Image: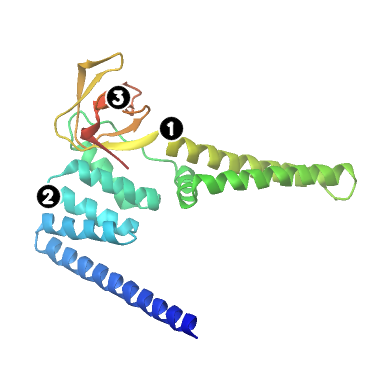
Amino acid sequence: MMRKAILSVLLLLGCIIGWAQDEAAVQDWNEATRSYAAHQYRNAAEHYEAIVKKHEASDVVYYNLGNAYYKNGERGKAVLNYKRALKLNASNKQARENISFIHSKTPGAPVVLKDIFFMRWYHAILYKIPANTWAIAALIGFLLVLFVIYRMITGKIRFGYRWLSLSAIVWLLIISFAFTGYRQGKVNTEAVVLSSQAFLYESGDMTKPRMSVPEGTILNLIGQPKEGKVLVRLANGTEGWIDQADVEIV
């Protein structure tokens, strides 16, 4: 009896906490919307950030946050949040176009190529599922291929080669998702330059500046931090070191 009473109290507390969080998110959203309409972009960004930190954010929240930062003159944070919106929803056309617009207005910024439509579908599926889940699916796919081969050998399956071809194609596609997810999550992490005075240093000499890197530049981290700097690769393939404090991971 006591156990049921405790469980009931815990359930009630959980509902109250959940309701309070939802209510707080609505308040932050309303205040952010009001502030944006009143051209108070810094305040709008702060309330969108509150939603991101305290609640589960959607691509719409990140997109609006990017808009608020752009209107406030913070191009780097704008691009960062547009990229986070795309990470949650690769088909967010407005976020992609806004990144291209910002880069077109930024001297020295790399040109962002538009993805082919099927690549947008590919990334939309990829980002919906964690890399570990894709790895498990790849293992299951491999076992499925072995099962089809076994059924072919024992003569217990019709149109065996067709089923084998289909299962092999599905398995290879899943392997592609698993490998890409692992590579992007572990090896080739995307980041955005937030500083207006960032420099790329020679890959062989971290003390020798090579070029300035505009705020809002998208790059890939390809090495572990060392002496306050991290090895990166730009969109044109140029590699070098950049101050770790000047970039933020997407």
**Which label belongs to residue 115?**
none
According to the picture, the residue beneath numbered tag 2 turns out to be 72
Look at 34% across and 60% down and name the residue there: 56
- 2 or 1: mark nearer the eye: 1
Question: Few, some or many C-alpha atoms within 10 Å of disc 2 (few <14, some 14-19, many ≥20)?
Answer: some
Please state which of residues 177 and 67 is positioned toward the viewer in this rendering.
177
Marks 2 and 1, Cα distance to the nearest angstrom? 33 Å
Earlier residue among tags 1 and 3: 1
Q: Secondary structure at mark 2?
A: loop
Label 1 neighbourhood size at 10 Å, few (<14), some (14-19), many (20+)? some
Disc sitting over residue 226 in the figure: 3
**Mark 2 is on which residue type?**
Asn
In the shown orientation, is residue 20 left or right of residue 1? left
Secondary structure found at label 3 = loop
What is the spatial separation of the Cα atoms under label 1 and label 3, in whole angstroms? 16 Å
Mark 3 crowd level (few <14, some 14–19, many ≥20, 10 Å Cα) = few
Which residue in the structure is indicated by mark 1? 187
Identified by mark 3, the residue type is Lys
Residue at (30, 50) in percent of width and height: 95
* Coordinates of residue 50 in the picture (x, y in percent): 22, 59
Q: Amino acid at mark 1?
A: Val
- How far is mark 3 from mark 2, CA to CA? 33 Å
Quadrant of the image for the C terminus?
top left
Closer to the N terminus: mark 2 or mark 1? 2
User: Which residue shows up at 18% across the image and 63% down it?
Assistant: 32
